[in-house]
Image: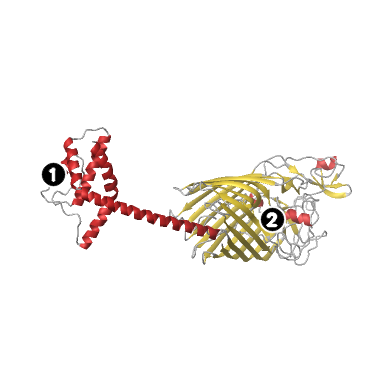
């Protein structure tokens, strides 16, 4: 038994690994050269009887090809292979403490002795092949190490460029109805106010009104056709310090011609004096200095870390809301396109199923806040009787009327992908602390206080501070203060088409502004917003921002045709309509001074073609309108309401534009 075990281990190691490869190779070579180093076993050789015996006792299942060919002579190679099978079978049986016939042990011993020269030759061949394989593996390891080092050097510093140019035309019509108790701008109660009547700001083409919660929209009354001229240039720098550490920097410069009057969408404008006089060459959005120049904005500058297990983090200024390959805008309603200064920690499942991120930091200062600072105005609405003026002031829940606290933001998102159904389901949470927020107070009234006409937070607060309410019902008005808005979002993304490269994607999302209106104490009126997109990409590049994508920031696929249908619905007090940001190529352009979409819904179709992996051309048609049955209030911000009770009863915009998009990185 000891003899069988010792020799069986050697025979199994040599024959099991090598016979089917080395001897097979030698046999093929021998057939090609006409010589056979393993001669046939003579027909009357005793080995045939030994093989038949072992086969009959169940230790041999046939020739190397699985058949037992007793009708033809076998080669010494075949006999050696059959011997090896018998040895392994007997050893397995002995290992299970089962009985083995002594005649079978004797037969195997004789076969191994007979074919020992062949086995010795095979052992030498196997050793040579193993040595050669080891040398080749060393060469492959060296090449891989060199390739990894080269790739790391390449990735240590990469420079990129992104450019968007979108010309087009739009037709806008805004209608405001006098809902107050007295005539306003020549219109009786219930009548529409005509353009050209005296208004909050005189402008060519009609009276201009501010409306909508959040950052106030501003647009003239009546029908208006105007051009679209939108340009964005981004410069990117990024790379890998080593396989785990990375960095990224992006700066951008944006030009948006807001409307045909040379004004900006931000009110009060960057380019206005104390008397609200338009300054020459003042027609650019964002941080314009009033001289017609275009500013440069630092989008992000971060140091990143990622582990092989999927943990990743960033420190510095970074973009938030990138849900990975299974989601893309405009569904990121809560924080798509935002930048924040702080840190984040996330997880990306190496299996490609579970993704998530937690972040905290200080958001960007809004252009509204900067414009108010530049024009020597307080960030908050000042002189509001009963809030920050007067001996009797009321503290409304989560409202800081003085804007003297530090702003911060905390958020998280998570997503799970089901590979069999190709479905991604996720959600997000976003909360701000000390955010500059424009509230609509339906209880606000015009109040004469200290010899001046002001806004008061309520009739009671006007009287409590010794003021006199202007005759008429409560006017309602806007006030900018710091608040703590919080919102949640649910998200679903479904893919269709070929399994490995789906060509269709349906995305739907819903988000809700949590909490209640601080002035009424009840849930927000119009707290929900919704978004849906249906996207087609002919090359299967329908996934999101991670890779070759149809519409948004990043590289595409040459000769890919892409189509997208979209719908967005923003409740009157939703967070989504205020926080929608730039996420690659924005489908809707803010050319009529719309600072937020609250109270509106948007329909659109966009078609594009990738001329190369880096260049895309796009055309789009979009329709924006107020939500039927939703009253969008009209007013001013922080002062007396000059159009008490007025509301927007009709708002439409039809837009057609083209786009050229370039991306190199």
Q: Identify the residue at image location x=63%, y=48%.
A: 343
Q: Residues within 10 Å of mark 2 (few under 14, many from 20)?
A: many
- Residue 564 versus residue 441 in the image, above or below: below
The answer to whether residue 3 is visible is yes
Q: Quadrant of the C terminus?
A: bottom right
The answer to whether residue 191 is visible is no
Q: Quadrant of the N terminus?
A: top left
Q: Is residue 14 left or right of residue 649?
A: left
Question: Mark 2, mark 1: which one is toward the viewer?
Answer: 1
Task: Return the mark for residue 595.
Answer: 2
Residue at the disc numbered 1:
49
Q: Quadrant of residue 375?
A: bottom right
- Circle 2: element type: loop
CA separation, marks 2 and 1? 96 Å
- Circle 1: element type: helix
Q: Residues within 10 Å of mark 1 (few under 14, many from 20)?
A: few
Total labels: the figure holds 2
Task: Return the mark for residue 296.
Answer: none
Relative depth, front residue between 206 and 383:
383
> Please, which residue is most extreme toward the left here?
44
Q: Is residue 525 left or right of residue 659?
A: right
Relative depth, front residue between 607 and 108:
108
Residue 395, position in %: x, y?
77, 40
> Please, which residue is most extreme toward the right here?
451
| Colour convention | secondary structure
Relative depth, front residue between 180 and 372:
372
- Badge 2 or badge 1: first in the primary sequence: 1
């Amino acid at each position: 038994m000891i003899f069988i075990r010792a020799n069986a281990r050697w025979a199994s190691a040599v024959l099991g690994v090598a016979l089917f490869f080395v001897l097979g190779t030698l046999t093929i070579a021998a057939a090609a050269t006409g010589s056979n180093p393993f001669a046939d076993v003579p027909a009357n050789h005793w080995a045939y009887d030994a093989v038949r015996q072992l086969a009959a006792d169940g230790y041999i299942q046939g020739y190397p090809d699985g058949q037992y060919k007793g009708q033809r002579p076998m080669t010494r190679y075949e006999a050696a292979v059959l011997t090896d099978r018998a040895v392994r079978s007997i050893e397995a049986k002995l290992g299970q403490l089962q009985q083995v016939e002594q005649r079978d042990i004797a037969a195997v011993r004789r076969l191994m002795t007979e074919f020992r020269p062949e086995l010795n030759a095979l052992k030498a061949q196997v050793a040579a092949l193993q040595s050669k394989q080891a040398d080749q593996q060393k060469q492959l390891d060296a090449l891989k190490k060199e390739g990894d080092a080269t790739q790391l050097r390449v990735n240590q510093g990469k420079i990129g460029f992104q450019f968007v140019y979108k010309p087009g035309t739009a037709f806008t019509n805004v209608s405001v109805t006098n809902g107050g108790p007295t005539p306003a701008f020549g219109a009786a109660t219930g009548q529409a106010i005509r353009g050209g009547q005296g208004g909050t700001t005189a402008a060519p083409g009609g009276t201009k009104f501010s409306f909508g919660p959040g950052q106030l929209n501003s647009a003239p009354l009546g029908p208006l056709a105007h051009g679209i001229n939108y340009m964005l240039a981004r410069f990117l720098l990024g790379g890998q310090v080593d396989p785990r550490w990375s960095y990224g920097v992006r700066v951008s410069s944006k030009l948006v011609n807001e409307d045909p009057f040379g004004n900006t969408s931000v009110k009060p404008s960057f380019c206005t004096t104390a008397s609200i006089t338009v300054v020459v060459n003042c027609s650019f959005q964002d941080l314009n200095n009033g001289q017609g120049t275009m500013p440069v904005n630092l989008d992000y500058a971060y140091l990143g870390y990622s582990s092989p297990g999927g943990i990743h983090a960033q420190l510095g200024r970074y973009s938030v809301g990138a849900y990975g390959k299974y989601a893309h805008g405009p569904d990121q309603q809560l924080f798509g396109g935002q930048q924040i200064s702080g840190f984040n920690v996330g997880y990306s499942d190496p299996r490609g199923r579970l993704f998530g991120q937690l972040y905290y930091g200080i958001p960007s200062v809004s252009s509204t806040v900067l414009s108010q600072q530049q024009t020597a105005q307080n960030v908050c609405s000042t002189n509001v009787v009963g809030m920050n003026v007067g001996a009797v002031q009321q503290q409304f829940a989560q409202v800081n009327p003085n804007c003297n606290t530090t702003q911060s933001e905390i958020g998280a998102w998570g997503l799970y992908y089901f590979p069999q159904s190709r479905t991604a389901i996720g959600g997000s949470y976003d909360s701000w602390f000390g955010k500059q927020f424009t509230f609509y107070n339906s209880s606000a009234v015009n109040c004469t206080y200290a010899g001046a006409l002001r806004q008061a937070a309520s009739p009671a607060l006007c009287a409590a501070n010794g003021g006199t309410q202007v005759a008429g019902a409560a006017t309602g008005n806007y006030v900018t203060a710091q608040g703590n808005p919080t919102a949640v979002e649910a998200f679903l993304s479904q893919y269709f088409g070929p399994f490995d490269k789906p060509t269709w994607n349906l995305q739907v999302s819903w988000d809700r502004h949590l909490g209640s209106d601080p002035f009424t104490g009840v849930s927000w009126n119009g707290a929900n917003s919704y978004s849906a997109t249906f996207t087609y990409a002919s090359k299967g590049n329908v996934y999101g921002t991670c890779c070759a994508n149809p519409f948004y920031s990043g590289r595409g696929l040459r000769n890919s045709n892409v189509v997208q249908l979209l719908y967005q619905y923003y409740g009157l007090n939703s967070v989504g309509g205020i926080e929608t940001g730039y996420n690659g190529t924005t489908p809707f352009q803010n050319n009529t001074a719309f600072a937020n979409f609250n109270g509106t819904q948007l329909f659109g179709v966009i078609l594009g073609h990738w001329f190369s992996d880096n260049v895309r051309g796009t055309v789009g048609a979009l329709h924006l309108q107020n939500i039927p049955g939703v009253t969008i209030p009209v007013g001013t911000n922080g002062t007396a309401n000059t159009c008490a009770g007025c509301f927007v009863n009709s708002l439409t915009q039809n837009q057609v534009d083209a786009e050229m998009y370039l991306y190199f990185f």
